[in-house]
């Protein structure tokens, strides 16, 4: 009988601390063989193999280590829901806690990929029920053989990893900061500089999406549209409602379909819409106000949409709300038109910002200054606040570690997916704008796939034009 580890004993209710030999013997027996022998490789496995091959080609002769990471402790023995590091998911298709992908350089060139994972819990030594993270507590895991079949990847027991890492010489690149044990094991071998380059290479590998990823993002957008439709339905009747209910309604749709959200939903009504990251969601949404909903479903394979619609709570824009909305819509149209393969990444941002500057100038917000001069000085930014978009994929702000040269100062390529999300935000206490504008915030955000001759709007199912938004709301509200 294995000794029960101390920390388990401390964690668990003292009543069950003592284990008699009879109970230990009893728990060892009577379990059926549940090994699944009929598993076929998941569709994703052909893609992950290709992604690993590309990574391998960039780092010949080096040992490459990509951990999944460990759950973040919330308090004592409870953790936040686990999500693997995006690079690990990208290269393996796996989502296990504590997994580690190792690409070992081979003599004849290339790398051999091995995935180190926790195997199934041992019944013989009681680990499955005495270990607080045994399968009896946390649920059945795939066996290593099952995972080999599903992922089309050699799998080994993670408890053999440290020894193996010690046995492979040569330079090492590590995706640092996800698994302290792996970081420690490679201390002194991997350099911080080398690891930064590795992180950058991974981000740049992910800039152009393969067809599996595009299908996931398309699905994420479709699922997100269903969540937005549910939100419109609860706005029916035009009575006051709450940001909380909006948040919960969107989340419920994501969860009942087996998905999650890719970031904290921004459910911002009235003046809250002028706060870019309004995730407190603790206000009311009243008739006559706008509701800015920025939310995205994350698929089971961890790809997220990132969509914003700004909706009149009672289904009709007021004239001043419509004026602001239409300026943002025009800016988004200009931005979207600038998204195509071969264009500079900055083009869509510049196009949208210019249109906003023109509108702000026409409304007299720059005083004597022309739109051109204000734009040159960036004065529109008092009300446009943020950049006009970003790459999208496994992370909502995807590929953020890519070099400036390849991302922000780079060129769009077919297969990239990005958001175009201009906005105007007039703070409630901004005395430089007419009173009627104060407290109005509008953003429209769509997810675009760059194609050879332009783009495809993956979130086009959700109406954007003001009159289409009103008609859509009226239809859903019956
Ligand atoms: N929801 C975060 C963003 O739009 O970038
Ligand atoms: Mn967003
Ligand atoms: Mn965004």
Image (cartoon, rainbow, N blue to C red):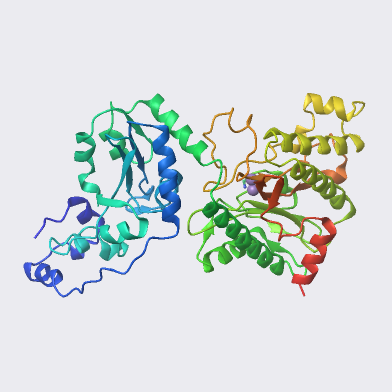
Q: In the rendered view, would you say 304 is above or below 348?
A: below
- Residue that sits furthest to the left in the current view: 21
Choose between 456 and 300: the one closer to the eye: 456
Q: In the rendered view, would you say 374 is above or below 348?
A: above
Task: Examine the image and state in which quarter residue 130 appears.
Answer: bottom left
Query: Where does the image place residue 55, in percent across and percent down from the top left?
Result: 42, 38
Query: Where does the image place residue 281, in percent across and percent down from the top left?
Result: 62, 54
Residue drawn at (52%, 54%) of the image: 212
Task: Examine the image and state in which quarter residue 164 appears.
Answer: top left
Where, quadrant-wise, is the C terminus in this rendering? Answer: bottom right
The answer to whether one can see residue 26 in this image is yes
Task: Examine the image and state in which quarter residue 132 appears.
Answer: bottom left
Q: Is residue 228 left or right of residue 399?
A: right
Residue drawn at (45%, 59%) of the image: 43
Query: Where does the image place residue 230, in percent across and percent down from the top left?
Result: 66, 67
Q: Is residue 364 left or right of residue 134?
A: right
């Amino acid at each position: 009988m294995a000794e029960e580890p101390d920390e388990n004993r401390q964690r668990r209710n003292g009543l069950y601390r003592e284990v008699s030999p009879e109970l230990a013997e009893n728990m060892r027996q009577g379990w059926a063989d549940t090994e699944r022998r009929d598993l076929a490789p998941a569709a994703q496995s052909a893609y992950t193999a290709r992604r690993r091959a590309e990574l391998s080609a960039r780092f010949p002769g080096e040992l490459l280590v990509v951990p999944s990471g460990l759950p973040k402790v919330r308090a004592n023995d409870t953790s936040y829901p686990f999500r693997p590091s995006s690079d690990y998911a990208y290269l393996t298709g796996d989502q296990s806690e504590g997994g580690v992908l190792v690409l070992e350089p081979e003599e004849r060139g290339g790398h051999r990929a091995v995935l180190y994972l926790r195997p199934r819990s041992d019944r013989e030594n009681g680990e499955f029920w005495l270990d607080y993270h045994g399968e009896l507590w946390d649920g059945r895991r795939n066996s290593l053989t099952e995972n080999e079949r599903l992922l089309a990847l050699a799998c080994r027991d993670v408890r053999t990893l440290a020894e193996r890492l010690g046995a492979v010489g040569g330079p090492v690149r590590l995706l640092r900061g996800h698994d302290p044990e792996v970081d420690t094991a490679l201390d002194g071998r991997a350099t911080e500089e080398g690891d930064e380059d590795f992180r950058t290479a991974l981000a740049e590998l992910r800039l152009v999406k393969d067809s599996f990823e595009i299908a996931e993002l398309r699905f994420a957008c479709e699922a997100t549209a269903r969540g937005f439709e549910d939100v419109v339905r609860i706005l029916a009747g035009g009575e006051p409602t709450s940001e909380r209910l909006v948040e919960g309604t969107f989340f419920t749709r994501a969860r009942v379909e087996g998905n999650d959200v890719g970031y904290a939903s921004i459910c911002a009504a009235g003046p809250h819409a002028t706060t870019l990251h309004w995730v407190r969601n603790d206000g009311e949404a009243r008739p006559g106000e706008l509701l800015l909903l920025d939310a995205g479903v994350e698929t089971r394979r961890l790809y997220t949409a990132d969509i914003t619609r700004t909706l009149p709570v009672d289904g009709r824009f007021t004239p001043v709300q419509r004026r602001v909305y239409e300026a943002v819509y025009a800016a988004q149209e200009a931005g979207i038109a600038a998204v195509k393969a071969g264009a500079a990444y900055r083009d869509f941002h510049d196009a949208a910002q210019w249109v906003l500057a023109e509108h702000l100038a026409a409304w007299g917000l720059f005083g004597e200054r022309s739109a051109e001069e204000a734009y040159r000085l960036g004065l529109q930014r008092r009300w446009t606040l943020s950049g006009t978009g970003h790459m999208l994929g496994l992370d909502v702000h995807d590929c953020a570690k890519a070099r400036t040269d390849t991302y922000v100062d780079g060129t769009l390529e077919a297969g990239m997916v990005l958001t175009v999300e201009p906005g105007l935000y007039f703070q409630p206490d901004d005395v430089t704008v007419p009173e009627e504008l104060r407290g109005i915030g509008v953003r429209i955000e769509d997810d675009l796939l760059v194609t050879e001759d332009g783009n495809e709007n993956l979130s086009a199912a959700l109406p954007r034009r003001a009159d289409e938004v009103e008609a859509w709301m009226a239809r859903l509200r019956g």
